[in-house]
Image: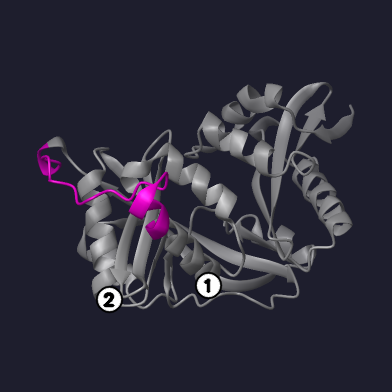
Amino acid sequence: MSLHIRLMTPADTSAGMRLKELAGWNQTEEDWRRFLDAGPEGCFVAEWNGHVAGTVTTIVYGGVLAWIGMVLVDPQFRGRGIGTALLTRALEYLSTRQVPCVKLDATPEGRPIYEKLGFHAEYAIERRALRRPNNARAPVPAPHRTNPGNGSGREAFDRILTMDREVFGADRSALLRSVASAAPQFVIAVPQGSGLEGYGLGRRGSRADHLGPWAAHTAPAARKVLEQFLARSRREVVFVDDVQENLWAPELLVEHGFRTSRGLTRMYRGENNDPGPPKHLCAILGPEFG
């Protein structure tokens, strides 16, 4: 029996999709392409006797923060150290990039493994799901869409990127532009003077529409983003990964019928010098992206 870890390639997308389906996750083939576009030298697969048995991805944001995601191991190969080997390889790669801080979102099962590798808890996240019957999703007139492509839409989107850097703690403009281009109907900006009071983006996952990132400086702005997203989404199921330290998101989501499906812990390794204010980050982009 032999374990071999190598770079992920576009040809591994189908294997990655198989593993995420086994885990019941929401990613699409487009998400796998985003990982490879953002970090082609930092995404890896584990082969067990020639078969893809696990994956891990990394993205470096602005040279100051690295993100580890998509730590997946085929259930039939668990218990053989594959997940730890993948994480070790990812951390070795990131050490060559000299990134001061590495983060990830851990499941309860994964947290003890990450703690052994030097990760510390930062704050709690809840994955919440809303399931809407067809008669509860009657067409609702959607507000004006912020198109990141040109004109005033580009100016509004630049403000979204500025606010996201503040609440996330690093520049991930390239990734957010990709997300916005794929689902411009989910780009929501709540203006305030020359800046923003709140914003939201969204993705169409394989199982549900996903709201995130979602941030706001006031309760009315947080509500406006959520309700505009729900008006624009036509899927039966909606996911949100809300930050438990946030001032408004947990109560708003309960009010709108969301139910908790799992808990996560945001964890960091290294110097967490610019964590961003979680009280203004209503929901993350996703555990795979940060």
Q: Tag 2's secondary structure?
A: helix
Q: What main secondary structure does the magenta stretch of the protein show?
A: loop
If the image is split into quadrants, where does the N terminus sit?
Answer: top right
User: Is disc 2 surrounded by few (<14), some (14 to 19) or many (20+) residues within 10 Å?
Assistant: some
Colour logic: one colour
Three-letter code, disc 1: Glu
Three-letter code, disc 2: Ala
Q: Tag 1's secondary structure?
A: helix
Pick the residue in front: 61 or 20. Answer: 61
| Residue 46 located left or right of residue 3 | left
Q: Position of residue 257 (x, y in %)?
A: 22, 57
Q: Position of residue 89 (x, y in %)?
A: 84, 47
* Inter-mark Cα distance, 2 to 1: 18 Å
Name which residue lies at 87% across and 32% down: 4
The magenta segment: 135-156
Q: Where is residue 46, by image quadrant?
A: top right
If the image is split into quadrants, where does the C terminus sit?
Answer: bottom right
Q: Position of residue 143 (x, y in %)?
A: 19, 51
